[in-house]
């Protein structure tokens, strides 16, 4: 996490910062987005929020939990050995991430209010892909790019939000320990 930096947004006022529910960090992550149609919203929202498979009978449930633990351990061993498949979402980019949203430079301009399917790859062990629906709340050019989007999560499973918050806290801890100073949002 050497390239990760943390900061608050220098463009926000003190009242903006005090209204935040989650701490925001600057880091590098693989992110994919795609606009969704209004017809897709309800179905995708329900899938993302529930993400639960039908409950198996008690004996099958114990077996499923056991197999899930084995799979998790196998993923960790493969990752540690450098043998895991590269199912990456793509190249990493600089992002600002919090439990309530994400901001990053985009390849295309999005209008405010556009709803996107957002997939974020967290570099945890095992690797975790967070799938969420987000609404573009701000879209503007930056010094580095013609297009940047600030996206508020509107549908996210609580376990995924917890994973994002845990990741941002881990990044913040690492930055504090290494003495990395806060970096302005447009740096």
Image (cartoon, helix red, strand yellow):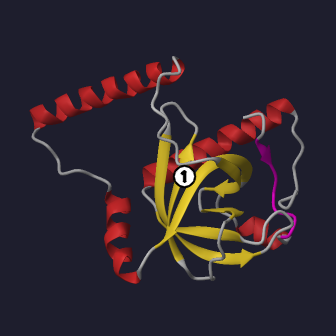
**Is label 1 in a helix, a strand or a loop?**
strand
The residue lying toward the viewer, choosing from 56 and 109, is 109
Q: Is residue 163 magenta?
A: no
Please tell me whether residue 131 is drawn above or below residue 170 in the rendered image: below
Q: Position of residue 83 (x, y in %)?
A: 48, 22
Tell me, yes or no, if residue 68 can be seen here: yes
Residue at image position (39%, 22%) is 73
Q: Residues within 10 Å of mark 1 (few under 14, many from 20)?
A: many
Residue under pointer 1: 120
Please tell me whether residue 37 is drawn above or below residue 118 in the rendered image: below
Please tell me whether residue 80 is drawn above or below residue 178 in the rendered image: above
Quadrant location, the C terminus = bottom right
Q: Is residue 6 magenta?
A: yes
Q: In the rendered image, which quarter is residue 95 located in?
A: bottom right
Tell me, yes or no, if residue 23 can be seen here: no
Q: Position of residue 14 (x, y in %)?
A: 84, 69
The residue lying toward the viewer, choosing from 164 and 81, is 81
Q: Which residues are magenta?
A: 4-11
- Predominant SS along the magenta part: loop
Q: Is residue 54 left or right of residue 123?
A: left
Residue at image position (48%, 51%) is 130
Q: Is residue 27 left or right of residue 180?
A: left
Q: Position of residue 156 (x, y in %)?
A: 46, 61
The residue lying toward the viewer, choosing from 31 and 55, is 31
Q: Is residue 177 left or right of residue 157?
A: right
Quadrant location, the N terminus = top right
């Amino acid at each position: 996490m050497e390239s990760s930096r943390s900061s608050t947004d220098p463009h926000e006022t003190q009242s903006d910062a005090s209204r935040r529910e989650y701490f925001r960090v600057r880091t590098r992550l693989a992110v994919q987005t795609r606009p969704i149609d209004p017809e897709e919203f309800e179905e995708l929202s329900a899938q993302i929020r529930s993400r639960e498979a039908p409950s198996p009978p008690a004996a099958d449930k114990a077996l499923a939990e056991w197999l899930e633990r084995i799979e998790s351990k196998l993923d960790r061993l493969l990752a540690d050995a450098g043998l895991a498949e590269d199912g990456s979402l793509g190249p990493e980019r600089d992002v600002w991430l919090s439990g309530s949203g994400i901001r990053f430079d985009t390849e295309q301009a999005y209008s405010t209010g556009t709803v996107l399917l957002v997939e974020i790859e967290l570099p945890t062990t095992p690797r975790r892909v967070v799938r969420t629906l987000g609404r573009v709340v701000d879209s503007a050019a930056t010094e580095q790019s013609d297009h940047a989007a600030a996206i508020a999560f509107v549908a996210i499973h609580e376990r995924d939000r917890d994973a994002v918050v845990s990741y941002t806290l881990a990044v913040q801890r690492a930055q504090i320990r290494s003495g990395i100073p806060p970096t302005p949002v447009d740096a």
